[in-house]
């Protein structure tokens, strides 16, 4: 049972480059979300989705874009990477009203 | 402004003793409270939760206490074990699927 799968695990970008962090879940969860974890800042919500075709902004959405074309996938796009986006990114999913399951994270460095 | 505060960045206890992790929240509309545990290089995993209609929930060595009037919850681990060494995040939820996390407390259990 794969759960929540994130790729890649590590990524180094140059300032201004764009990239997509992939997230897939095989639990048929309606709710999916992206968090970033920074030292001393905890987990901050970037974007979330309550179902295919529906997305909304979280606490720190600037510089990121998402889409939800299927129930399973919820990619996070960095439009023009900046050093401030150096962080560890976690994707999570759940059924409504139940606990969140997290992926193992993507460590991103922007030089 | 922080909606969820974990004021102790770190906590160190001896094996076999009790660990108490604390969390304060600001919004009385929050109605579901959770603790997540995170090991290095892994995603957070759900530990225990409590709804606003209860003041205590127990699961083995882990007990969560909720004091709604003080907007305070705590996680008790007894007895503490070295394998409990991790970062513990408090999270709150109210009216939507979004979880708001605290900054985390790093627990170290010394053998």
Image (cartoon, helix red, strand yellow):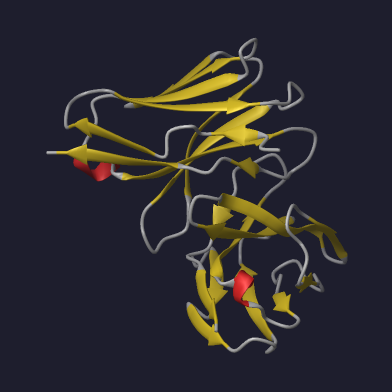
Q: Residue A44 appears at what percent x and percent y? A: 64, 53
Please report the residue visible at 47 percent of the width from the left and 58 percent of the height from the top.
Answer: B43
Q: Is residue A65 above or below residue B15?
A: below
Res B60 visible = no
- The count of marks equals 0
Residue that sits furthest to the top in the current view: B69
Q: Is residue B53 above or below residue A21?
A: above
Q: Residue B111 appears at what percent x and percent y? A: 12, 39
Res B21 visible = yes
Q: Which of these two is toward me, B33 or A107?
A: A107
Q: Quadrant of residue B8?
A: top left
Which corner quadrant holds the C terminus of chain A? bottom right
Using residue B55 as the reference point, say whether residue B40 is left or right of it.
Answer: left
Using residue B29 as the reference point, say whether residue A12 is left or right of it.
Answer: left
Q: Which of these two is toward me, A101 or B88?
A: B88
Please report the residue visible at 76 percent of the width from the left and 81 percent of the height from the top.
Answer: A79
Using residue B36 as the reference point, say whether residue A52 is left or right of it.
Answer: right
Please report the residue visible at 50 percent of the width from the left and 50 percent of the height from the top.
Answer: A40
Q: Residue A27 appears at what percent x and percent y? A: 62, 60
Please report the residue visible at 55 percent of the width from the left and 50 percent of the height from the top.
Answer: A41
Residue that sits furthest to the right in the current view: A53
Q: Residue B4 appears at what percent x and percent y? A: 62, 34
Q: Is residue A90 above or below residue B11?
A: below
């Amino acid at each position: 049972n794969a759960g929540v799968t994130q790729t890649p695990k590590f990524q180094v970008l140059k300032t201004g480059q764009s990239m997509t962090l992939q997230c897939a879940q095989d639990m048929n969860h309606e709710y999916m979300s992206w968090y970033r974890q920074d030292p001393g800042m905890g987990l901050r919500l970037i974007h979330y989705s309550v179902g295919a075709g529906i997305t909304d902004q979280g606490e720190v959405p600037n510089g990121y874009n998402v889409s939800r074309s299927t129930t399973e996938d919820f990619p996070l796009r960095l439009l023009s990477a900046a050093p401030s986006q150096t962080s560890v990114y976690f994707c999570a999913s759940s059924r409504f009203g139940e606990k969140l399951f997290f992926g193992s994270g993507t460590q991103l460095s922007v030089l | 402004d922080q909606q969820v505060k974990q004021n102790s960045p770190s906590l160190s206890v001896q094996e076999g003793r009790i660990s108490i992790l604390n969390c304060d929240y600001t919004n009385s509309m929050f109605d579901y409270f959770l603790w997540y545990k995170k090991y290095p290089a892994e995603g957070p995993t759900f530990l225990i939760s409590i709804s606003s209609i209860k003041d205590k929930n127990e699961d083995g060595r882990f007990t969560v206490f909720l004091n709604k009037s003080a907007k305070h919850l705590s996680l008790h681990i007894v007895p503490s074990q070295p394998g409990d060494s991790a970062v513990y995040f408090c999270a709150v939820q109210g009216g939507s699927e979004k979880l708001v996390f605290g900054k985390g407390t790093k627990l170290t259990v010394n053998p």
